[in-house]
């Protein structure tokens, strides 16, 4: 019979794992007697050897029946830890990828990249969790798992803080609320086990975690608050009448009209809505016997009067729409420095009774660094008189004729999207001067029911604004330029 080296089974550690040495050399570890037999079998010991034979095995800290490991409990904790880390990994990548790949500004792309990288770290932490609740071949596995849990706690805590601003239900809430609770449980467990003990320099690890957290916080603050507010936004609009021309074949005068816009700011924009309206003005004249305030009250008090301009010698103003149309299509974009001009010609009779002709150009727009508009959906008009679209239908006797544009808008910081209900941009246009632009979470309806405070808040959040230009000329000047 050959003589084999003496086997020593060490005292169970805090997890019930016992180290096995043969001839003074560590050959493995075991959670149970069956694992011990497999390890000894790989080194030439018989499968059915007597584990209680003191001539073959030396037991320290308990005999062959001392196996304190609770495998089901350890594996359950490991499975729950891995599941939480993997779910958070997927969620962080879902949050960060749209910004990392498509954000307009550099700061927002950095924020997206940080979330994607945090997802990678969480994936590594999930692998480390298997080792930490297993044989612990890697000394730093516990610290890596701790880092992953801290990332989950920080990101989901941030999402909850953003959610509390509006307290709106979103399906993503069912992800980051349980994940936040999970991270608190996991952090308490890892701190209690002092999972960072395997690190050679735990203070350096802690300093790295703090530095990373500060960098992430600064990046988020810059991308969500400072950068959108600091970027300038300027919009130039012009409206001008040209020289009129007489048409000998018709009793009309042709009046050229030039409309112009330019993005003179530092941010591209979406055109949400626009309208130009040419109106003729008729007024009654007086000798100025009454004071200015009286003249103004009478002008405003007359049904169908204009906007109530106050002129001493002019009373009872009446405006008639001569021409109305679109300048650009809803959903079009205007990049930095880009300009656009439109020339139109409208007609007025030679013997027209108007005193003046005016043009009013209005444009509403939204900054592209604040949100991304679903242009394909938004650019499709929905006529209000079309009964085949019940959602937008309105009886012509009530609404006349209107075009409704509506599309989904997503904030360029995806953290906002996952903590808010979906927002939609709505634009309503009509040639009679109706010009409405709004952003809200409410379904479209003609009843006017909605949260106007939310609309104002969302318009500001997405950087929506309006620009206006106007011009007015005497009809006598137009007729003189045409030689009438």
Image (tube, helix red, strand yellow):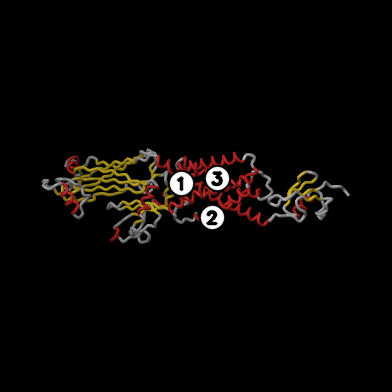
* SS class, disc 2: helix
Q: Nearer the viewer, residue 222 or 251?
A: 222
> Can you say whether 453 is above or below 338 in the image?
below
Residue at x 30%, y 58% (from the top left corner): 399
* SS class, disc 3: helix
* SS class, disc 1: loop
Q: CA distance from mark 3 to mark 1?
A: 17 Å
- Disc on the earlier residue, 2 or 1: 2
Residue at x 32%, y 44% (from the top left corner): 467
Q: Are marks 2 and 1 in contact (CB under 8 Å)?
A: no
Q: Quick one: quadrant of the C terminus? A: top left
- For disc 2, the neighbor class at 10 Å (few under 14, some 14 to 19, many from 20) is few
Residue at x 77%, y 43% (from the top left corner): 25
- Disc on the earlier residue, 3 or 1: 3
Say whether residue 231 is left or right of residue 431. right
- For disc 1, the neighbor class at 10 Å (few under 14, some 14 to 19, many from 20) is many
> Can you say whether 202 is above or below 435 in the image?
above
| Residue 263 x %, y % | 36, 40
Say whether residue 317 is left or right of residue 43. left
Q: Disc 3 designates what residue? A: 118
- Disc on the earlier residue, 2 or 3: 3
Q: Disc 2 designates what residue? A: 178
Q: Nearer the viewer, residue 444 or 62?
A: 62
Q: Disc 1 designates what residue? A: 413
The residue lying furthest to the right in this view is 1
């Amino acid at each position: 019979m050959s003589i084999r080296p003496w086997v020593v089974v060490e005292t169970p550690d805090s997890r019930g794992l016992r180290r096995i040495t043969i001839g003074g050399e560590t050959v493995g570890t075991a959670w149970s007697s069956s694992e011990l037999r497999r390890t000894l079998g790989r080194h030439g010991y018989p499968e059915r050897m007597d584990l209680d034979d003191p001539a073959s095995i030396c037991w320290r800290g308990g005999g062959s029946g001392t196996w304190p490991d609770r495998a089901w409990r350890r594996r359950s904790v490991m499975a729950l830890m891995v599941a939480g880390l993997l779910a958070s990994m997927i969620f962080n990548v879902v949050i960060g990828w749209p910004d990392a790949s498509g954000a307009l500004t550099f700061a927002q792309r950095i924020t997206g990249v940080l979330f994607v990288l945090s997802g990678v770290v969480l994936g590594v932490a999930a692998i480390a969790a298997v080792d930490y609740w297993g044989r612990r071949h890697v000394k730093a596995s516990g610290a890596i798992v701790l880092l992953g849990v801290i990332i989950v706690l920080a990101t989901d805590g941030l999402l909850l803080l953003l959610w509390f601003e509006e307290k709106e239900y979103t399906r993503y809430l069912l992800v980051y609320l349980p994940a936040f609770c999970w991270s608190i449980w996991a952090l308490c467990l890892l701190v209690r086990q002092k999972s960072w003990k395997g690190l050679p320099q735990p203070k350096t690890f802690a300093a790295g975690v703090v530095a990373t957290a500060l960098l992430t916080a600064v990046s988020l603050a810059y991308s969500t608050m400072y950068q959108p507010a600091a970027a300038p936004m300027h919009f130039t609009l012009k409206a001008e009448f040209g020289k009129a021309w007489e048409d000998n074949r018709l009793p009309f005068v042709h009046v050229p009209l030039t409309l112009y816009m330019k993005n003179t700011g530092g941010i591209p924009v979406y055109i949400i809505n626009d309208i130009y309206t040419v109106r003729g003005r008729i007024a009654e004249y007086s000798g100025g016997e009454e004071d200015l305030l009286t003249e103004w009250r009478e002008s405003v008090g007359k049904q169908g009067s204009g906007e109530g301009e106050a002129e001493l010698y002019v009373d009872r103003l009446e405006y008639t729409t001569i021409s109305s149309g679109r300048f650009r299509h809803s959903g079009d974009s205007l990049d930095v420095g880009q300009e656009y001009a439109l020339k139109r010609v409208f007609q007025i009779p030679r013997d027209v009774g108007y005193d003046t002709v005016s043009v009013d150009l209005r444009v509403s727009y939204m900054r592209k660094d604040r949100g991304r508009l679903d242009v394909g959906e938004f650019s499709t008009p929905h006529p209000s008189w079309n009964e085949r679209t019940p959602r937008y239908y309105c009886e012509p006797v009530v609404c006349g004729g209107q075009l409704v544009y509506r599309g989904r808008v997503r904030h360029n910081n995806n953290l906002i999207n996952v903590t808010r209900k979906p927002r939609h941009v709505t634009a309503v246009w009509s040639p009679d001067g109706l010009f409405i632009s709004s952003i809200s979470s409410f379904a479209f309806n003609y009843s006017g029911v909605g949260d106007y405070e939310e609309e104002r808040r969302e318009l500001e959040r997405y950087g929506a604004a309006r620009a206006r230009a106007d011009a007015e000329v005497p009809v006598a000047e137009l007729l003189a330029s045409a030689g009438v």
